[in-house]
Amino acid sequence: MDKQLRPRASASQANRTRRKLAEAALHDVLNQSTRPGFFGSCSVELTINDGTIQNVRRRVEKIDRVLPSKNVKCNGC
């Protein structure tokens, strides 16, 4: 393997720690969103610089959905 392609030791240690954070963020986002009554979107975003994970961002956007009552007529629903 080329010397240039080998990961640096410090980058590997930082990536191990941030990888655990990223996995925990994905687990948390899935737990929040994969349940009845959730309408919206979610994401986990990693910012990577030179092979090192710099940031882990999680986003959960929930849409408040109001369903019409069964007794109310709704045109176009």
Image (tube, helix red, strand yellow):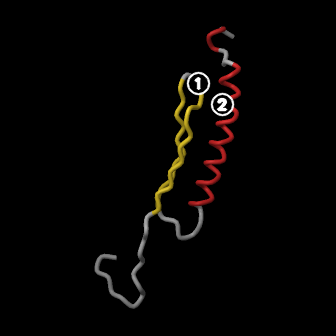
Place of residue 30 in the rendered image (x, y in percent of width and height, measured from the top left):
60, 55
Q: Tell me the element at label 1.
A: loop
Residue bearing mark 1: 51
Task: Determine contact: label 2, label 1, CB under 8 Å.
Answer: yes
The quadrant in which the C terminus is found is bottom left
Q: Is residue 20 shown above or below 53?
A: below
Q: Secondary structure at mark 2?
A: helix
Mark 2 = which residue?
Answer: 15
At x 65% / y 8%, what residue is drawn? 2
Q: For mark 2, does the 10 Å Cα neighbourhood hold few (<14), some (14 to 19), or many (20 or more) residues?
A: some
Considering depth in this image, is 17 or 3 the residue closer to the camera?
17
Q: Residue at x 69, y 25 (%)?
A: 12
The residues bearing labels 2 and 1 have C-alpha atoms spaced at a distance of 9 Å
Q: Residues within 10 Å of mark 1 (few under 14, many from 20)?
A: few
Q: Position of residue 22 (x, y in %)?
A: 62, 42
**Residue occupying image coordinates x 62% and y 54%:** 28
Q: Position of residue 69 (x, y in %)?
A: 41, 85
Q: Quadrant of residue 6?
A: top right
Q: Is residue 42 above or below residue 50?
A: below
Query: Relative to 20, is 42 above or below?
Result: below
Say which amino acid is labelled 1: Gly
Which quarter of the rendering shows the N terminus?
A: top right
**Disc number at residue 4?**
none
